[in-house]
Amino acid sequence: SWIIALAVIVLLGLVVVLLNVAMPKFKSLQRLTDRLNLVSRENLSGMLVVRAFTNEKFEEARFDKANEDLTRTNRFTQRVMSLTMPIMMLIMNLVTLLIMWVGGHAIAESTMQVGDMMAYIQYTMQIIMSFLMISMIFIMVPRAMVSADRVQEVLTTELSIKEPENPVTLGNESGELRFDDVSFRYGNAEEDTLSHISFTAKPGQTTAFIGATGAGKSTLINLIPRFYDVTGGAVYLNGKDIRTLSQKELRDNIGYVPQKAMLFSGTIDSNIKYGKEDADVNEVLAALDCAQATEFVSELPNGVESSIAQGGSNVSGGQKQRLAIARALVKKAPVYIFDDSFSALDFKTDAKLRRALTKYTENAVVLIVAQRVSTIMNAEQIIVLDEGKIVGKGTHKELLKTCPEYREIAESQLSKEELA
Ligand code: ADP
């Protein structure tokens, strides 16, 4: 019996030693796999850039390093793990030998029968085999633990945008959108990206935002669908703080066109209906028409049933932009947000689209972020942002007189006649 106890203790000792040696390597294995994935993915998605700068050799070396690191670590852990099986078999056979040795003596002294010894060996094998199985499982534990930790990290991450417990409903009173002394800071930033922003966007009017790159225009716009929550002040829609509305209701009321048009694989029709599932043919066509997409869609062999590849890679930037606009328009929302959505369009299409938009969005609050003064010249209200602050608010004409920042932007883009 002491032989069994000894064998089990040796086995468990072995497992503990192996775990201690292999655990840190297993942990780094996961990190190295990440690194390899990252490098490969960057190389694939940035293939054209890599080629344009003839950096193939550099990228190859980068991949090689990531790959080599992973291979080395993998080889080490596999070697350690491959030791376990022979060692365990050795222990098992040594145990058999020991039993025969001790049993042999007992049989010679006639205190034990051969059959008893054989039976004892059988039982011992079964016990040790079970412990072997347990230790095999323990070998898989380190990897599982590392993976479980990572899953756990995701699961326990707290949502930064919280659903209110008793959401109020929007109602359909005034429909205006109001920023009240809003400040905002990104979680990892040291300074406020937006500070003390106050304005009211009225239904039936266009409110435009202009300013240098990095002035905070996209950040401001992203506060409205609650992609981020304000860190000071509040945003009101219909007089209700948007944090008291359910996220579904809030977002159902917003037609959003992102800065980077993103389409899903499917057809043009399925992409437009992403905005409104039960939209009928006429609604889809009207939205396409307003977004100035009818012309190029009708030239496609299958019209609205033409397929869109993953990420919309089979249509041009401007076409993608127009489809994204149509997707937002089909929703018939009381608030429309265009985040720099007209920059991929040529001037003529831009002008036609704005004209159609005025009709289409009659009573809606329209918010436009733009780079081109000509895009927003006719807006009822233009807000000029600079380093996260409002430095000018008014119509094109007023701002030309009162806001030097706006005047500077306008002078750089418009001719003297247009300015006059
Ligand atoms: P704009 O749209 O006017 O070009 P953005 O709103 O995109 O400007 O950016 C405003 C500022 O906020 C920039 O200085 C940018 O570096 C910073 N910023 C943007 N997104 C993030 C983010 N996710 N985390 C931290 N800082 C950000």
Image (cartoon, rainbow, N blue to C red):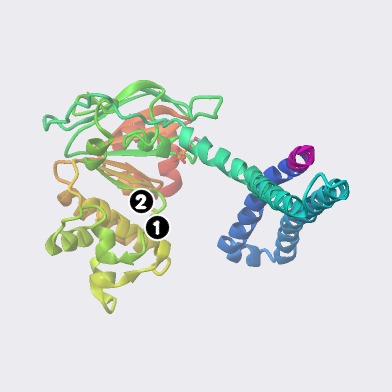
Question: Amino acid type of disc 1?
Answer: Ala
Instruction: Return the residue at label 2.
Output: 341
Q: Mark 1 and ligand 1: say if the CB distance to the nearest ligand atom is below 8 Å.
A: no
| 251 shown above or below 63 | above
Kindly check if marks 1 and 2 are in contact, taking CB atoms under 8 A apart as contact: yes
The quadrant holding residue 19 is top right
Residue at the outermost bottom position: 301
Of 11 and 224, which appears nearest the observer? 11
Q: Would you say residue 10 sits in the magenta stretch?
A: yes
Q: From the image, tell me which residue sits under label 1.
A: 344
What amino acid type is highlighted by mark number 2? Ser
Which residue is rendered at x = 16% and y = 39% of the image? Answer: 204
Residue 373, given in percent of the width and then of the height, sits at 36, 45
Closer-to-camera residue (33/61): 33
Marks 1 and 2 sit apart, C-alpha to C-alpha, by: 7 Å
Q: Which quarter of the image is occupied by the C terminus?
A: top left
Magenta span contains residue 238 = no
